[in-house]
Image (spheres, rainbow, N blue to C red):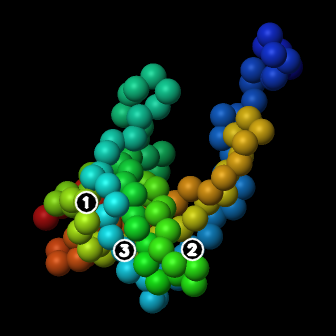
Amino acid sequence: MPTSTARGIAASQPKEVVVARFPIDLSGLRFIAGSEPAGVTDMEGRPRPDKATGELLWQLDLVVLGLEDGAEVWSTRIAGEPKGISTGQVLHVEGLSAMTWEMEGRHGTSFRARVIASDGSKSKPAGAAA
């Protein structure tokens, strides 16, 4: 049976629930690095690993060009460190998906990519052997 906290919220409630995942059609879109890649950490400041691969998660802002309503900035995560990326650089992106989530009464959309690389580099997933 769930225990109650002082605020009346069940302590055994899941922290985050992914509601749905949607692949994004990348045709006609261009991407620019809006930030340097940074490691993702948990609430205690520890690096967060990807649940599927065990690789550490990284995040960077993608400036997305080619959308109907103009450019947008999407904070995007990737498993494994994307190397050789600097702010303002044109990027190659593969396997981009959007996920809706809900956590403690809040909700939103997060983005995840399988590959983020400099546009001039060889296309491969982050963390793959050279």
Which residue was labeled with disc 3? 31
Which residue is rendered at x = 66% and y = 34% of the image? 15
Secondary structure of residue under mark 2: strand
Q: At numbered mark 1, what does the secondary structure look like: helix, strand or loop?
A: loop
Q: Report the amino acid beneath label 2.
A: Pro
Task: Find residue 63 and report its horizontal and vertical position in percent.
Answer: 40, 68
Residue lying furthest front: 70
Residue 37 locus on image (x, y percent)? 29, 51
Pointers 1 and 2 in contact (C-beta within 8 Å): no
Give residue 6's quadrant in the image: top right
* Earlier-in-chain disc, 3 versus 2: 2
Q: Position of residue 124 (x, y in %)?
A: 26, 71
Asked if one can make out residue 46 in the rendered structure from this viewpoint, the answer is yes
Q: Residues within 10 Å of mark 1 (few under 14, many from 20)?
A: some
Which residue corresponds to the image point at 26% horizontal and 74% vertical from the top-left? 90
Q: Is residue 79 visible?
A: no
Q: Which residue is mark 1?
A: 87
Nearer to me, 74 or 120: 74
Observer-side mark, 1 or 2, equals 1
